[in-house]
Image (tube, grey):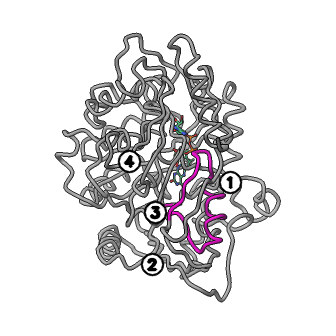
């Protein structure tokens, strides 16, 4: 038996020997990149330790494939695959996001305009069910619905223990050109044009204010006249407003937002020189976890990751400027590569766009965060947009299942977790995450 099989055997045994149906959560080595919620029941649930699932099992440079365990971080993956002049076709931009978390949670980045999310680049998952059965799931085999439904279900449908995914050719450097726009219509037109032509390796941007839009167009290059890193005094998102172009080593490009996307502290140069080396999103999330019991929720910044159909973006922004007004925003164009099984028929019936913009709001401090989560959720629902479930989620159960696909979720749940030890998707992300418990076995 190889090391991976031994690890699988260990958790299979633990699941088979477990008694009762109390909720079970996963313990990982790295910090969890979901918005800290002090009352989250995951802190008090029983835990299954999967922290040793962090090995890259194979890199196949000929077929451009990688096989790895779910706890492998994108930093490690990029480091290892670059040795073959390859990188994953989607690289989440914080160093310690794991590939398992990217599938079970969400993932977006500047190649998403071509490839969608990390799950869209996956070809196979090994999944361990709540009863300790080991399934191999692909888009074409008898477990194809399980394969499609693993995305965004936050561990409620089973444990991903191995992933096979695509790699793409890479070069040593990335040149980024910053295109500046004064209005949203020109910005949208530029994004759409690159989307249709697929003429860039990378595309994302920062909306610094309602009159200042930056489109960051990236290309792999073999050589660079200079390179910058954004791991100390410099702040990447601010540089997009000041610079016309930039060169970064490929790994530094992928993790350019590692200090916190648009929520970077401290900001002043002297303080960055003193402390900038030591602060990053990983440290912030770790501190929030450690001090969660004494952290007032109003001190946890509002963080929302939205997916807006390009055709509804103007309407959204007009509303957002009036009702929320927090800038900067991170903008990541995202291709809907197929009609996802985890979205409800009702939701999909109104989706006309195949290009969405992921508009991410980080670091907004307000006295009443709940109000902002609520009005953003309601506005998104009205315009056929969604948010990822990493935030505080206030949906009612009916509102929730109008977006996510309850029949498909239940179909898979019956196979992979019939006793509901991983909780239902609504229960976990909308109730338990807020410290609430549902009595009836619904939400599945
Ligand atoms: C401040 C912040 C910044 C972010 N920035 C980015 C960004 O730049 N780019 C980007 O793509 N995304 C970003 N995200 C979103 C992030 O990618 C997702 O939240 C992702 O799910 C986190 O991955 P993780 O490895 O931390 O997973 P975790 O948070 O550990 O896990 C996410 C969920 O998946 C479940 N899970 C984890 N592993 C498994 C497994 N093996 N099997 C089954 N279920 C599992 C967990 O139980 C949990 O419910 C950001 C999120 C935050 C809060």
Kind of element beneath mark 2 = strand
Classify 427 as above or below 54: above
The residues bearing labels 3 and 1 have C-alpha atoms spaced at a distance of 19 Å
Residue at horizontal 67%, vertical 36%?
Answer: 288
Q: Which mark is residue 265?
A: 1
**Where residue 146 sits in the image (x, y, percent)?**
36, 38
Q: Measuring 24% from the left and 42% from the top, which residue is drawn there?
A: 382
**Which type of secondary structure does the marked residue at label 3 adopt?**
strand
* Tag in front: 2 or 3: 2
Of tags 3 and 4, which is closer to the observer?
Answer: 4
Magenta highlight range: 65-90
Name which quarter of the figure residue 42 lies in: top right
CB within 8 Å, label 2 to label 3: no
Q: Which residue is mark 3?
A: 209
Q: Decide whether residue 83 is among the magenta residues.
A: yes
Up the image or down, 304 lies above or below 264; here it is: above
Q: Which residue is mark 2?
A: 179
Marks 1/2: CA–CA distance:
26 Å
For the residues labelled 3 and 1, say whether their Cβ atoms are less than 8 Å apart. no
Query: Which residue is at 35% across, 75% downward?
Result: 198
Q: Residues within 10 Å of mark 1 (few under 14, many from 20)?
A: some
Please tell me whether mark 4 or mark 2 is closer to you in this view: 4
């Amino acid at each position: 038996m190889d090391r991976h099989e031994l690890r699988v055997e260990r958790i299979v045994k633990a699941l088979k020997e477990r008694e009762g149906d109390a909720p079970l959560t996963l313990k990982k080595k790295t910090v969890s990149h979901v918005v800290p919620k002090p009352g989250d029941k995951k802190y008090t649930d029983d835990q299954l330790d999967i922290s040793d699932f962090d090995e890259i099992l194979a890199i196949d440079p000929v077929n451009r494939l990688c096989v790895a365990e779910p706890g492998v971080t994108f930093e490690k993956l990029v480091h290892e695959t670059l040795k073959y002049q390859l990188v994953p076709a989607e690289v989440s931009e914080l160093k310690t996001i794991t590939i398992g978390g990217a599938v079970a949670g969400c993932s977006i980045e500047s190649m998403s305009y071509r490839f969608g999310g990390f799950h869209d680049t996956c070809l196979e998952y090994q999944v361990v069910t709540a009863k300790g059965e080991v399934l191999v799931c692909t888009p074409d085999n008898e477990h194809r619905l399980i394969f499609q439904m693993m995305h965004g279900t936050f561990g409620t449908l089973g444990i991903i223990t191995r992933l096979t995914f695509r790699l793409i050719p890479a070069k040593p450097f990335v040149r980024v050109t910053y295109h500046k726009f004064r209005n949203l219509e020109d910005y949208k037109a530029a994004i759409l044009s690159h989307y249709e032509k697929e003429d860039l390796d990378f595309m994302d941007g920062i909306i610094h204010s309602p009159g200042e839009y930056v489109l960051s167009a990236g290309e792999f290059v073999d050589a660079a006249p200079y390179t910058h890193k954004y791991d100390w005094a410099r702040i990447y998102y601010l540089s997009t407003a000041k610079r016309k172009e930039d060169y970064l080593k490929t790994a530094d490009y992928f993790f350019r937002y590692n200090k916190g996307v648009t929520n970077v502290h401290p900001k002043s140069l002297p303080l960055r020189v003193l402390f900038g080396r030591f602060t990053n999103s990983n440290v912030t999330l770790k501190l929030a976890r450690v001090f969660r019991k004494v952290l007032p929720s109003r001190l946890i910044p509002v963080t929302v990751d939205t997916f807006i159909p390009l055709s509804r973006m103007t309407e959204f922004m007009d509303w957002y400027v009036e009702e929320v007004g927090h800038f900067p925003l991170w903008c990541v164009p995202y291709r809907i590569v197929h009609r996802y099984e985890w979205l409800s028929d009702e939701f999909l019936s109104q989706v006309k766009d195949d290009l969405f913009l992921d508009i991410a709001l980080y670091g907004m401090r307000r006295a009443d965060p709940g109000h902002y989560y609520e009005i953003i959720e309601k506005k998104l629902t009205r315009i056929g947009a969604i948010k990822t479930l990493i935030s505080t989620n206030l949906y009612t159960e009916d509102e929730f299942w109008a977006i996510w696909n309850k029949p498909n979720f239940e179909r898979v749940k019956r196979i992979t977790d019939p006793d509901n030890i991983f909780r239902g998707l609504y229960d976990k992300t909308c109730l338990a995450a807020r410290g609430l418990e549902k009595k009836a076995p619904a939400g599945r």
